[in-house]
Structures are given as C-alpha cells and as structure tokens.
Amino acid sequence: MILSVSIRGYLCKTLKLLAFFLLFFTFSVSANQAVITTTDYSSGSISSLDLSTNTAVRDHLTIHSDAVVRTYRDKVYIINRLGQDNVLVLDHSDLKTPLTQYSTGNGSNPHDMVFVSEEKAYISRYGRTQVLIVNPVTGDSLGAVDLSGFADADGLPEVSQLALYDNHLFAACQRLDRDNGWVPTDVSVIAVVDVMTDQVVDVDANTAGVQGIVMVGKNPAGAVQRGNKWFLSAANTFDDLTDGGIEVIDLANLRSDGVVLGEMALGGNLSSLAMVSDDEGYVVVLDVNFANIVKRFDLAMQSVSSGLSGLSGGFVPSLGVFGGRLYVLDRGSFVDPTSAGVRVYDVKTDALVAGPINTGLPPSGIAFVGSVADFNGDCVVDFSDFLAFASAFGKAASDAMFDLDGNGSVDFPDFLIFVSEFEGE
C-alpha cells in the first residue's frame, strides 16, 4: 500500500512537471494525410491528400462506386456499401495493398463504423436490424446488437450514423419508409447501447419498453461528434426546404437539445456538416434549384453566412475540418465538370487557400489520419485535450477513450502516448 501511494505520488508530480513542459513546447505529429474516396457512380477509387502541401496522389486502389472511408490510428477502413457489402482494411502508409477484406452480409448495405479499440468496432447496416460487432482489423465477428425494436413498419430501423461516448454507442435510426419513397416516418431515434455489455440502454424509464433518444428533427444526414455533443443535420423531407435543421444530441445526459438552427434560417435542405467549435461550423445547403452552397453558421449567435466563394455550385457530398482548414469535396457542375476537386479554406477567414485539387474521379468522402489523443474532436491535440486527460489520469478506465494503451486504467504509459501526440498551440 505504501509503495502504491508512493508511486501514485511520483506519477502525479511527474504529470504536473510535464504539464508545464507541454505549455511551453510544441510537438508536431504525423496527422497530415487525408484519404479520399472518389467515384463516377460506375467505378470508384482511393486518392490521398498531403495536407502540408495540398497535393494529391490519385487512384491508389479501385473500390466500390458507393463507398465511405473511416480511419482509426494507423488504419484506413473503406466501407463498400450496397452491392459489395464489405469492409476493406489498409495501412495508411500503403493504400495500394489491402491488409484484409471482410463481408458484412449480402445486401446488408454497411453505412458507418466506429472504434472502441483496435480489437472492437461497430458497423451499422442500413439493410439489417442488427449492428455488427467486429475486430476491425481482422473482421472476426464479436456478435451483434439487435435494434429491431426501433424499426418502423417496413421492418428496418435504417441505422446509419454512429458515435461513441462514455462507454455508450449511439446509433442514429433514421426510420424511413422504404415502401413509400423513403419518406421519414413519425420520428427518428438515437438508440443507445452499453459498450461493456452490448445491450440496448433504456433512456426513459417512465415509458413502457426500451426507449431511445427521440429526435426533434427527422432523417439525419450529416453527423459530427465533438466530445459529448453530437451535431446532426436533419434534412427531414427534401420537398420542403424549411422542415429540418441542425440538431444537437447531448451524449452525456442521453437527450436531445433540439433543433438549434433551422432550415428556414439556413435557406434550404441540409446534407453534410463540419464543426470548427462547439458553436461554429459549416453545412451544405441545397436551395430550391438543388444548387449546393456551403454556409458557415454560429449556433450561439444564430447567424448564417451567405456562402463560401469559389465553389462550382454542383454536388458537395462531404466536408471535413482538420488543423484550421475546411476541406470541401466539390464534384463540379454539369456546365463545368472539370471544376471538380477538393477546395481548401482557412476557417478563420473563409478564404480559399487551395484548389480545386484534382483527385482523379470526382471526390465523394474524406477521412483524416488523425490522433487518438484528440479527445474533444476538434482535430487538434492541444491543452484542452490535456485537461480532459488529466481529469481521468490515475483512475480506472471508466471512459475507454482515455485508456490509450488498452490496459484497463489511465496511467503513465497512456500519458507517454498522449505526449507523443501533443501538438500545442
């Protein structure tokens, strides 16, 4: 016991000393690569972007024409959707050579993937009632979570976006009527799952049955997590430009904060979303003519910009924010398809700083090779992340995201990993 107390005291003193060190010195890390899926809707490919030079390497590998990309630590995961229904695993340093590929079930239409660790991940499937649990690297099955209780009358809950927070999985059940033109039904729901037991959590004990978080909006399209906040762009129906908005889910308290900024103010239907802070972000807005405009918004000020300059007006399927830059995936216009590419904006000034960067086929999705120590989700490992880590240091890993080496506690080896990832101010 005395030895244990002494060791704890030594570690705490060391932590304080390193905190002062971190305040005055900057560490640079390897988070300078984006992986981009591209498609012409008949074929697909992977390109990569060097974020320090804004240069692309095109066509590393042929993939499905309908695919999305996710990253975790040094691995890249290509989710090949309906028609191929599999996950392709790559190392970020070699995007030409797959490490493995595994099926999610014929016709299952995998949509999203989130990672508890290098040994456990969840995969949502639009064409199934169950969320898969897998070893993300090998594809070995670890089970499934049954969300059939959240299905609408067509028998499927249409599970799409996923998030993780405080040992809970959050699964957005769009609940669209596939027998009636995919229109939203009565409500969209966020199902909550305990990641320790893989059992669905009842968030409302006063209502019969197992309840999820009922959204105020419907049909979430874009999703961004920042710490305990999950920002969803809820489009609702596409024939009404005013019935959706940006909704915030409070992941810590298992509730919706409601639609914070509506489509009426934003000026059209919403799709992809990116956040710069807990209040400011960008969203793709489709106007009455289906022209795509990227607008900056401030939830606290309830303000909306007129739109970024320099875009083609064509389809913008995805946005990403990393290291003070906004990456806009612009597929070009019918008038000028050569205008397709990635456009890069400074998030402080909204000025176009690069692009369009040619990705071969038009770009469709983007993910960054980032850091496990980015606890608040702002794509920078800085002092705010250090404060979050310090609050968990020396405790059992009640929140798995702080247990960086996966040994069940937040201890000195985790801190050394954090130091190696620290970027400073």
Image: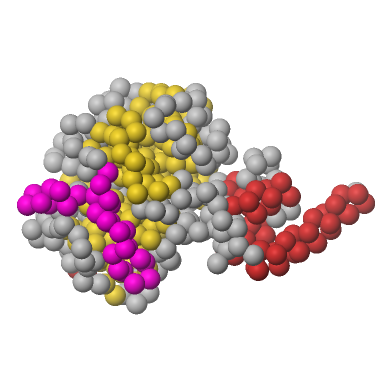
Say whether residue 140 is visible.
yes
**What coloring was used for the rendering?**
secondary structure
When the figure is inspected, residue 410 is found, relative to residue 100, above or below; the finding is below
Magenta run includes residue 202: no
Q: Residue at x 31, y 69 (%)?
A: 350
Q: Which residue occupies 16% across, 57% down?
A: 312
Residue 282 horizontal/vertical position (percent): 31, 63
Let me know if residue 358 is in the magenta part: yes
What residue lies at 30% left-to-right and 59% top-to-bottom?
A: 354
How far from the left and from the top, in percent, is residue 42?
18, 31
Q: Is residue 292 left or right of residue 370?
A: left
Front position in the image: 196 or 150: 196
Quadrant in which residue 298 is drawn: bottom left
Image location of residue 60, percent across then percent down: 34, 33
Tally the marks.
0
Residue under the point 21% across and 31% down: 43
Query: Which residue, as the protein is rendered here, is positioned at the far bottom?
Result: 301
Could you say where residue 76 lies in the image, as x and y percent from the top left? 44, 37
Q: Which residue occupies the foreground of this view, 160 or 18?
A: 18
Examine the rendering and report whether any part of residue 230 can be seen: no
Q: Which residues are magenta?
A: 332-359
- Depth order, front residue of 405/348: 348
Q: Is 263 placed above or below 338 here?
A: below
Depth check: 166 or 34 in front? 34
Image quadrant where one finds the C terminus = bottom right
- Residue 363 is left or right of residue 192, and the answer is left
Which quadrant of the structure image shows residue 384? bottom right
